[in-house]
Amino acid sequence: MQPGLESTVSKISWRLIPLLFLCYIIAYIDRINVAFAGLQLQKAFGVDSAKYSEIYGLGSGLFFIGYFIFEVPSNLILNKIGARIWIARIMIVWGIVSSSMMLIKSPTGFYFMRFLLGVAEAGFFPGIILYLTYWFPVRDRARTVALFSTAATLSGFVNSPVSGRLLQLDGFKGLAGWQWLFLLEGIPAVLVGILVLCVLPDGPRKARWLSAEEKGKLLAELEEENRADSGKKHSLRDVFTSGRVWLLCVIYFLLNVGGYGCEMWLPQIIRSFSNMSELRVGLLNGIPYIAATIFMVLNGRHSDRTGERRWHVAASALAGALGFILSAYSSNIVFSLAGLAIAFAGVKGMVGPFWALSTACLGGTAAAAGIAWINSVGNLGGFVGPTVVGYLKKATGGYSAAIAVLGCALAILACLAIALRPATKEKKAELQMVPSNPDT
C-alpha cells in the first residue's frame, strides 16, 4: 500500500460507510419485515395453519425470484451510469412497493407483491459491493464489506422490537397491525433514496472531500491492483462459463438457504416455543442478530489481518451447522435459541470473507457482471430456504426437521469452501470481464 493511503481509506470509510450502512438497514428491514407480518397474515388470508405454512414459505421466497431475474442487468446499468442515480432509483421504487404491501388481500396478491419487491430491490446489494471496489483496495475489503453488512444484522436487532410494537397497532384507524408495519417501514426508503441522489459521489474522482493528492494515491493503488490481477479483457460470456464462478454461486446459494431459511421464519419459530406476545417475540428475535453483528466484524477483521478467506468461510459455516443442529434437537428453550444465535452468527460471519474472496477472484474493480451473477444465483437460496422450511413445517407439524436441513446445507457449504483453491494470476486474468467504472 502506498505511503499515506491508510489515512485516505479511513477518511473514505467515515464518509461513505455511514450512509451506505443506513441504506442497507432500510433495505433489509423492507426485505425481512414480512417475517413479522407473517405472525398475523394467516388470519388475513383465512386459511388453516398447515396451508398457511405453505403459502407463507412460498410467498416470502418469491422475493428472490424477482431479485434473480433483474440482478445482472441492474449491476451493469449501475456500472454504466453511476451509483448515485441508480441506487437512489432502486431505493425510491422499492420503498413505494414495500408500503404498497399493505394493500394485499389474498395469497395471490401476496405472491405478486413479494415478487415485485424483489424486482424493485434487484441490484442494490451487488451494486454496493461493486461500488466499494471503486474505493477500497483488496486488503481492506473483507473488513469493509463486513462492516457494511452488519447493517443487515443490526437492522434485525433494531427492527425486531419495532415490528413487534407495530403489530400491536392492530385495529388502529381501521388498519391491521401488519398493514401499519408495511406502510410505515416503506417510507424511509423513499426519503433516504432522495438523500442518496443528493450526496453520494459516483467514484473517487467526483468526491469533493478528497484532495487531489489523496485521489492520486488511491487511484494509483487501485490501478496497480488492476494491472496485477488482470490480463486482456474477455466478453460477458466468460462470467457464465467459468467453473470457479459457478462454485462461488453454489457456495453463496447454500449460505442463503441457511440464512433466509432461518431469518424469514425466526419470529414464528420463536413463537412456537410458547404462546408469546408479538412484542416479546420481537425482543427475543433480536438476540441472534446481536450475536451475528459481533461475529461478522471480528471474522472480517481477522480475515483481512491474515489475508485468508476460504477457511474463514468454512469455519463459520461449520459453526452455523452445529448451531442449527443444536437448536433442532434441543427441547430446552434457552439452548434452542442459543443454537439459532450461533447458527445465524455463523451464516453472517461468512459474508465479509466470502465477498473479499469473490471480488479478488474476479479481478478486483472490473467485476460488475461477476458480482451480480454470484449474488443473483446465490440469492435463489433465499427462495429455496424459506420454501423448504414451509413445506417441512406443513409435513411434520414442527420446525426441527427444517432446521436440521438448514444445518446440512451449511455443512455442505463448508466442504465446498475448503475445496475452493486460491486463483492463480492466469486464472484471474481469464475472469476479467467488464472494465472498471470510468468515474473511478
Image (cartoon, rainbow, N blue to C red):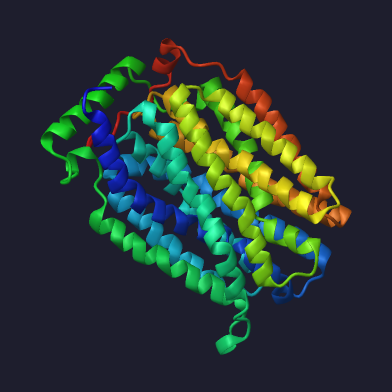
Which residue corresponds to the image point at 18% horizontal and 43% vertical from the top-left? 206
Vertical side of 11 occupied by 304: above or below: above
Residue 37 % position (x, y)? 63, 68
* Quarter residue 89 falls in: bottom left
**Horizontal arrangement in the rendering, residue 418 relative to residue 405 (left or right):** left
Q: Nearer the viewer, residue 379 or 411?
A: 411
Vertical side of 39 occupied by 415: above or below: above
Q: Of all residues shown, which one is farthest toward the left?
A: 212
Residue 227 % position (x, y)? 29, 17
Which residue corresponds to the image point at 37% horizontal and 31% vertical from the top-left? 140
Vertical side of 420 occupied by 410: above or below: below
Residue 358 appears in view: no
Residue 53 % position (x, y)? 77, 60
Residue 52 % position (x, y)? 76, 65
Quadrant location, the N terminus = top left
Which residue corresponds to the image point at 46% horizontal and 56% vertical from the top-left? 25
Q: Nearer the viewer, residue 361 or 310?
A: 310
Report how many numbered discs are placed on residues in the image: 0
Q: Nearer the viewer, residue 44 or 297?
A: 297
* Quarter residue 282 falls in: bottom right
**Horizontal arrangement in the rendering, residue 159 relative to residue 77 (left or right):** right
Residue 243 appears in view: yes
Which residue corresponds to the image point at 27% horizontal and 45% vertical from the top-left? 81
**Horizontal arrangement in the rendering, residue 70 relative to residue 38 (left or right):** left
